[in-house]
Image (spheres, rainbow, N blue to C red):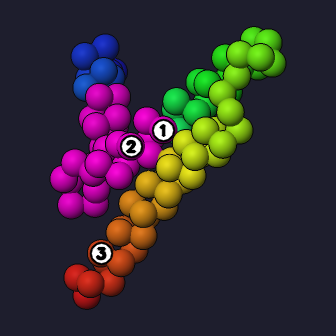
Amino acid sequence: MYNKRNIMKNVINWVAGLFRDESGNPSSKRFVGIVAGLTLCITMYVNSYTHGDIRPSDTLVNAVAMLAFGCLGLASADKIWGKRDKK
C-alpha cells in the first residue's frame, strides 16, 4: 500500500511535469500559460462575490485569457511540430 511520502512524491512529480516540455526541459510557455489561466480563474471567482464597481476591465480579462490560451497553444504546437521534425 502507498504511504503518504510516496503519494506526495507522485503529486510533486506530476505538478513538475506540467511545467516541462516533452524532452523534460522547463517550458516558460507552459508556466506563463498555467499561471495566467489560474489567475484568470481566481479573479473571475472572486469577482462573482464582489460588487460591479470593483472588477477588472473587460479588455484586461480578454488580454489575460488570450495570453493563457496563446501560451498553452504555442506549447501544443511545439509538441506537434517537434515530433514531425524528429522524424
Could you give the CA–CA distance between mark 1 and mark 3, rounded to whole angstroms?
Answer: 24 Å
Q: What residue is drawn where x is 36% and y is 68%?
A: 79
Q: Is residue 25 visible?
A: yes
Pointer 1 or 3: first along the chain:
1
Q: Is mark 2 in CB contact (under 8 Å) with mark 1?
A: yes
Q: Nearer the viewer, residue 48 or 55?
A: 55
Percent coordinates x, y for residue 7 in the rendering? 33, 23
Q: Describe residue 27's horizontal placement relative to residue 36 as left or right.
A: left
Q: Quadrant of the N terminus?
A: top left
Circle 2 residue: 32
Residue 20 higher or lower than 9, as above or below: below
Earlier sequence position, callout 2 versus callout 3: 2
> Quick one: SS at disc 1?
helix
What kind of residue is marked 1? Ala
Q: In the figure, residue 48 lies in which quadrant?
A: top right
* Amino acid residing under circle 3: Gly
- SS label for mark 2: helix
Image coords of residue 76 (percent x, y): 43, 64
Q: Which residues are magenta?
A: 11-36
**At x 79% / y 12%, what residue is drawn?**
51
Q: Is residue 25 left or right of residue 60?
A: left
Q: Quadrant of the C terminus?
A: bottom left
| Residue 37 coordinates in the image, percent (x, y) | 53, 39
Callouts 2 and 3 close, C-beta under 8 Å:
no
Mark 2 Cα within 10 Å, few/some/many (few <14, many 20+)? some
* Label 2, label 3: how far apart the Cα atoms are: 20 Å
Which image quadrant for residue 56? top right
Q: Which residue was labeled with disc 1?
A: 36
- What residue did someone put label 3 on? 82
